[in-house]
Image (cartoon, rainbow, N blue to C red):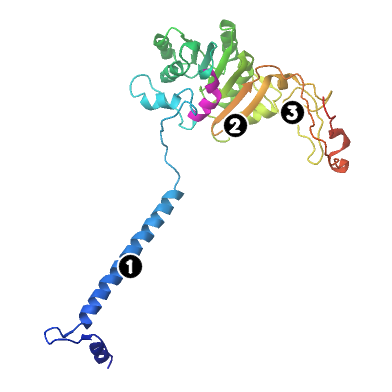
Amino acid sequence: LAQEHLKRATTVSGPGFLAMEVGPVWLFLSYLAVAGFTHLMSANLFRSSHDKKQAQLPPKAVFTQSTLETAPCGLMDFFNKHKEGPGIDKWVHYFPIYEEHFGRFCQGTGNLSMAEIGVQSGGSLLMWRHAFGKKLQLMLGLDIDNNTKAWEELGSNIKIEIGNQGNAEFLRSVKTKYPGGFDILLDDGSHLPEHQFTTFVHMWSAIRPGGVLMIEDVHGINPVFKWLMEGHMNENAKMPGLYYPRGRLGPPNDINRAGGDFLNNFGGKLGVASRIQNEVESVKIYPFIVAITKRRTPLHRLTAAKRGSQWIPYNHAVVGEEYETPADH
């Protein structure tokens, strides 16, 4: 019965030669239309799903062409183009960090002195010379491999000293031989925490005002950052700590007024900077890198100031009277 109704419904009336059964034709055309629509929708859905998945995937390491604004030293560009000659081995995410800390030297006009611990295949020496140009008066490489002495042939401003960065006597001899100090000291040496700590303790005094000491390849749960913050001692070096001297911590529910020679000194005569506050401008941590910057000029005093005319009084039960500061210092 259903077939008969379908036959009647799909018969076209007209001249004899035009009258025909269109049921099968109609069904075939309907099939094509539905199939085409389904294919189109599936393709769009697949494309949308594919694009979404692509957007969710982590981006691959892209060696992009940098600009003068974002990369005044042009270090990534040099690295990308360096195909022959002495080798350069760097984590790619280091390049923006280099630009952040070294960019001011590339744009500046004064003479520059740099030391790199661990020069190995020599290519980085070429990269620094390219970045800093004629401003680079001294490019000192420190390495334990006598073969690296050959890299002095790369330029008249390149000097190589052979020794162990974990040896205090060697580090002291370097400071004696190069008394002018360094604007940049890049520790890419043994990557051993004790060596990194020893190098900081002995070489920080050799960093010029406005300079930076950068420790590379601080991998995993390397303790060197904890040692820098809380203090440490080995047979070659000792330091009480930049932030938490000898690991001391203040009370968790009170404003601590501990004083002393550390970066967060808040005791004694309020406002008078400690020695470390006068020297250390910042300590920044990145994946695999710790960078400690020295102030261009001493801080001397830490001052607070108030501006404005409308004030809500402090709740002394919460912050305590001692936390309030005068309107101006």
Helix, strand or loop under label 1: helix
For marks 2 and 3 on the same chain, the one whose residue lies earlier in the sequence:
3
Residue 292 shows up from this direction: yes
Does residue 138 sit above or below 95 in this rendering?
above
Helix, strand or loop under label 2: strand
Residue under pointer 1: 38
The stretch in magenta equals 95-105
Q: Residue, x 14% and y 86% (percent of image)?
A: 15
For marks 1 and 3 on the same chain, the one whose residue lies earlier in the sequence:
1
Q: Residue, x 74% and y 28% (percent of image)?
A: 264
In the picture, measured across the screen, residue 240 lies left or right of residue 223, that is right
Q: Amino acid at mark 2?
A: Ile
Q: Nearer the viewer, residue 120 or 289?
A: 289
Which image quadrant: the C terminus?
A: top right
In the rendered image, residue 62, in percent from the top left (x then y), is placed at 41, 36
Which label belongs to residue 95? none
